[in-house]
């Protein structure tokens, strides 16, 4: 595939199933170059043999949730000001009706058990901020008084002056008469013209104060909402979560889980019988140990917490991983060796595989004996599968355009490293006999993973004539907690040798790979390790350091996770930090280096790039820098499509100059 073919990267979101299993609803999303944004709609497919069809025709409809009776779908759609609001539509189709008018848009939401109301979370702006006063722009707002350890978040910005609160709203009638704008008229003196309405009733705010509340979940009786509570700490980051139950009738709230439980909670889910389950991980006595977190499935009962999965071997922490229910059993997503499989877990803690093989499960749903799963595969960015007895059946073919664009399927390899440790990864090679120049790609995280899904980064490089080598070194996810924790306070050690040993082993195993023409690149933690590699290994013709974690000292005071990330990964001793810091060894870099970054990256702030680039220039190392306006840390995954294309063009131009393929 070529850069412009990113429009063929159609992803499938978490599906929902009708209570009788008769149909599924799901959202798709893809980059659109002309619109310069991600676009997508809701789709419906009747089971088991229906044909997928569009249910809505919005620009970017997402997050469908079926009313408990299966007759109506609630979903998120941007309103006229670009704010995500809840809309409802008949499950068979029709014109959606707007249900909310939140000033800064809606976060998570849920139907009540009786289908009469919808609960949601939404950020509430401090008076005078974020357009709450007409004509007052951001530059004229009052200064922000910050007293806590956190003040901003990547992809959002400031957080203390817009906490997320819980609301409930009566679900609108999906067949209701639409609203009409009032016509101009002469009115009695002092009487204002009526404002056009967009919702039938205003939402009721249930929580107040400075704490933020996560996506709400109704209790089985519908009387309370369960939500994770986030409070900005005064002095030190504390990852331990509180879960509160908030009464929907305004009677107050109660604690369901306190911080002394020692858990960071990713998700709360309630089974039909009222049992509460959590996706969560232990964070240690200090509340900050998040390295290779070991996310597990927990049952929260009257007699306390019970862990149902083995966190040393089962990892439920993949982005988008969630809890589903199939009768009394729980469905969860386990990432392992570049795949994400679907597991069934009983309340006794017995786990069995429901869907495995060469898939990455993105989301799932179960009802009336049916299970559907949204997955990515080596030849598709997203499909919907029907899972049952026998082989899973693919219900969609969104990957057709991607296959037409051209996909080189990766070859999976395991290389034994210098210390005997097995390093697992893949090689993508262009068509032909070679010899091909080789690029070593390094993933972010570090507790993340390269997987088997079709990946535009590798495919675009392969189309341009490069072999691409990539692996999951120690520090990565999907190989057990010991693998992930092995670089804690030891970054740039076994992770460095693992990527180099895999690189050398892959080249040795394939005569088409030219070991004399090589480059290296990576983003985030991959940017860190790329910068570390070129300070210690000078064979590479060029390097690309993207959105990197490059200076742990500066990171602590600038990143949205700076108050704990560096402390946990590189420690707090100055000498130990320096021994793991790319900035401390930048003087050793001779490799021509291209530094890529985004202006609004608050995860690895722009200062990380500018300091590193300046150091390279001062010592006369060939270096260039490219900074993307309006983008954050997610540029390569969720940035403006035109910026993504421009980034690919810059990457290919760099390699054409320093590592020409032809």
Image: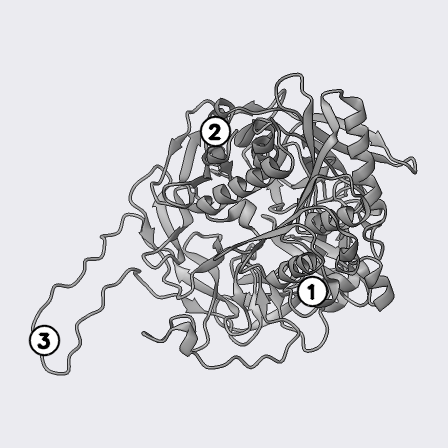
CA neighbours of label 1 inside 10 A, class few (<14), some (14 to 19), many (20+): many
Element under disc 2: loop
Residue 20 in view: no
Q: Residue beneath label 2, please? A: 398
Q: Position of residue 325 (x, y in %)?
A: 61, 42
Residue receiving disc 1: 555
* Among the two numbered marks 1 and 2 on one chain, the one whose residue lies closer to the N terminus: 2
- The furthest residue to the front: 620
Classify residue 229 as left or right of residue 193. Answer: right
Depth check: give the residue in front, 193 or 411: 411
x then y, percent, for residue 168: 44, 63
Tell me how far mark 3 sits from mark 1, CA to CA. 60 Å
Horizontally, is 472 left or right of 32 in the view? right
Q: Which mark is residue 187?
A: 3
Query: How busy is the neighbourhood of tag 2: few (under 14 within 10 Å), some, or many (20 plus)?
Result: some
Question: Is 283 situated above or below 515?
Answer: below
Does residue 421 lie above or below 323 as drawn? Answer: above
- State which mark lies toward you, 3 or 1: 1
* Dot placed on the residue nearer the N-terminal end, 2 or 3: 3
């Amino acid at each position: 595939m070529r850069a412009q073919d990113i429009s063929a990267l159609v992803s499938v979101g978490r599906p929902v199933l009708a209570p009788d299993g008769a149909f599924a609803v799901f959202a798709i999303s893809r980059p659109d170059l002309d619109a310069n944004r991600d676009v997508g709609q809701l789709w419906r497919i009747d089971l088991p043999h229906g044909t997928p069809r569009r249910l809505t025709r919005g620009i970017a409809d997402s997050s469908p949730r079926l009313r408990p009776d299966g007759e109506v779908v609630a979903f998120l759609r941007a309103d006229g000001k670009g704010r995500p609001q809840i809309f409802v539509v008949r499950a068979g189709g029709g014109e959606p009706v707007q249900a909310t008018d939140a000033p800064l848009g809606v976060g998570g939401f849920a139907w009540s058990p009786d289908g009469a109301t919808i609960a949601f979370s939404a950020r509430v702006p401090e008076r005078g901020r974020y357009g709450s006063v007409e004509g007052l722009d951001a530059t004229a707002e009052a200064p922000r008084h910050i007293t806590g350890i956190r003040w901003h978040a990547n992809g959002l910005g400031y957080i203390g002056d817009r906490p997320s609160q819980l609301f409930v709203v009566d679900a609108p009638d999906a067949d209701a008469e639409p609203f009409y704008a009032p016509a101009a008229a002469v009115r009695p003196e002092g009487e204002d013209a009526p404002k056009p309405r967009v919702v039938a009733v205003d939402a009721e705010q249930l929580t107040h104060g400075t704490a933020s509340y996560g996506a709400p979940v109704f209790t089985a009786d519908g009387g309370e909402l369960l939500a994770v509570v986030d409070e900005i700490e005064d002095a030190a980051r504390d990852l331990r979560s509180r879960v509160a139950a908030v009464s929907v009738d305004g009677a107050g709230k109660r604690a369901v889980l306190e911080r002394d439980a020692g858990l960071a909670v990713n998700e709360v889910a309630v089974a039909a019988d009222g049992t509460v389950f959590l996706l969560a991980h232990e964070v240690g006595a200090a509340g900050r140990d998040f390295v290779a977190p070991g996310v597990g499935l927990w049952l929260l009962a009257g007699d306390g917490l019970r862990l149902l999965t083995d966190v040393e071997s089962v990892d439920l922490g993949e982005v988008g991983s969630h809890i589903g229910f199939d009768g009394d059993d729980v469905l969860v997503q386990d990432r392992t060796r570049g795949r994400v499989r679907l597991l069934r877990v009983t309340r006794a803690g017995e786990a069995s595989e429901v869907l495995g093989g060469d898939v990455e499960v993105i989301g799932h749903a179960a009802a009336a004996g049916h299970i559907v799963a949204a997955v990515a595969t080596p030849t598709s960015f997203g499909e919907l599968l029907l899972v049952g007895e026998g082989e899973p059946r693919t219900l969609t073919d969104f990957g057709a355009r991607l296959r037409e664009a051209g996909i080189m399927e990766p070859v999976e390899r395991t290389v034994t490293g210098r210390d005997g440790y097995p390093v697992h990864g893949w090689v993508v090679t262009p068509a032909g006999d070679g010899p091909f120049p080789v690029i070593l790609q390094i993933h972010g995280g570090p507790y993340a993973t390269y997987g088997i899904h079709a990946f535009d980064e590798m495919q675009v490089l392969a189309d341009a004539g490069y072999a691409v080598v990539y692996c999951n070194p120690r520090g990565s996810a999907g190989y057990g907690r010991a693998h992930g924790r092995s670089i804690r306070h030891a970054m740039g050690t076994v992770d460095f040798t693992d990527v180099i040993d895999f690189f050398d082993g892959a080249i040795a195993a394939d005569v088409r790979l030219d070991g004399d023409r090589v480059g290296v690149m990576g983003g985030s933690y991959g940017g860190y390790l790329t910068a570390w590699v070129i300070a210690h290994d000078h064979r590479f013709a060029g390097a690309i350091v993207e959105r990197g974690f490059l200076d742990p000292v500066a990171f602590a005071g600038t990143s949205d996770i700076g108050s704990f990330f560096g402390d946990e990964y590189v420690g707090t001793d100055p000498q130990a930090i320096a021994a793991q810091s790319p900035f401390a060894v930048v003087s050793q870099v001779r490799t021509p280096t291209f530094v890529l970054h985004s202006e609004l990256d608050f995860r690895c702030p722009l200062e990380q790039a500018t300091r590193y680039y300046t150091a390279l220039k001062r010592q006369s190392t060939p270096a260039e820098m490219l900074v993307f306006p309006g983008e954050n840390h997610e540029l390569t995954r969720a940035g403006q499509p035109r910026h993504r294309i421009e980034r690919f063009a810059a990457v290919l131009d760099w390699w054409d100059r320093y590592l020409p393929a032809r």
